[in-house]
Image (cartoon, rainbow, N blue to C red):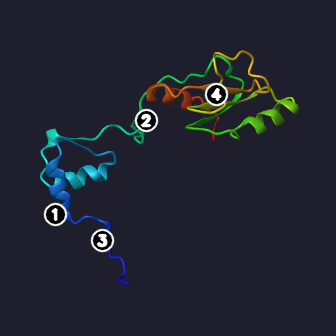
Amino acid sequence: MRKTQRSDIYPTSRTRGQAFDQFNSLIGVPPGIVEVIKKHDVPAERMTMPPNGCGLDFFSAEVEAWRPAEIVDTDLMAAFAGTHGLANGLDVATVLKQCGRSDIKLLLIGNSKLKPNPARAGQQGRPDNVIFRDLGNKICLAGLMQSTDIGM
């Protein structure tokens, strides 16, 4: 039995170039892919690199720090930005409440299976020291992160 070669898995440069020629336009998400496309003399107007959320430049911009209304300046705010699952923060929030620490708030930014549903009132069993927010735009996120005490 023949051993699999790298060339069996990855297209050669020539084959890749031929494939690029077949498309009206090309989208390169990571910058490295765009560089590969450029090496095959694909005109710039046929390729694009959309922002993929990985850029960090917006964190160095001059933005105003802010907090959600549920979190006052004297609260310790721990924030997690990104998709979060069932376990993120809820057990810790319950323990904090049991210890009488209402001054510590957990902010979960992004998508979650547990994010409050506006159609459901009350959210039974969800601690009130966990605040859910949509991701929003990156400049708002940068301002929010400036006022964050702990990043999770």
Residue 152 lies left or right of residue 25; in this view the side is: right
Q: Is residue 16 above or below residue 42?
A: below
Q: Nearer the viewer, residue 60 or 23?
A: 23
Q: CA distance from mark 2 to mark 3?
A: 44 Å
State yes or no: discs 1 and 3 in contact (Cβ < 8 Å): no
Q: Element at badge 4?
A: loop
Position above or below: 36 against 110 = below
Outermost residue to the bottom:
1
Residue in view at x 57 percent, y 32 percent: 111
Q: CA distance from mark 1 to mark 3?
A: 14 Å
Read off the residue under disc 3. 8
Residue 30, percent from left and from top:
34, 48
How would you rate the neighbour count of disc 2 (Cα within 10 Å): few for under 14, some for 14-19, many for 20 or more?
A: few
Q: Earlier in the sequence, mark 2 or mark 1?
A: 1
* C-beta proximity under 8 Å, tags 4 and 2: no
Residue labelled with disc 2: 60
Which tag is nearer the camera, tag 1 or tag 3?
A: 3
Q: Residue at x 60, y 22 (%)?
A: 67
Check disc 4 and give the amino acid type. Answer: Lys
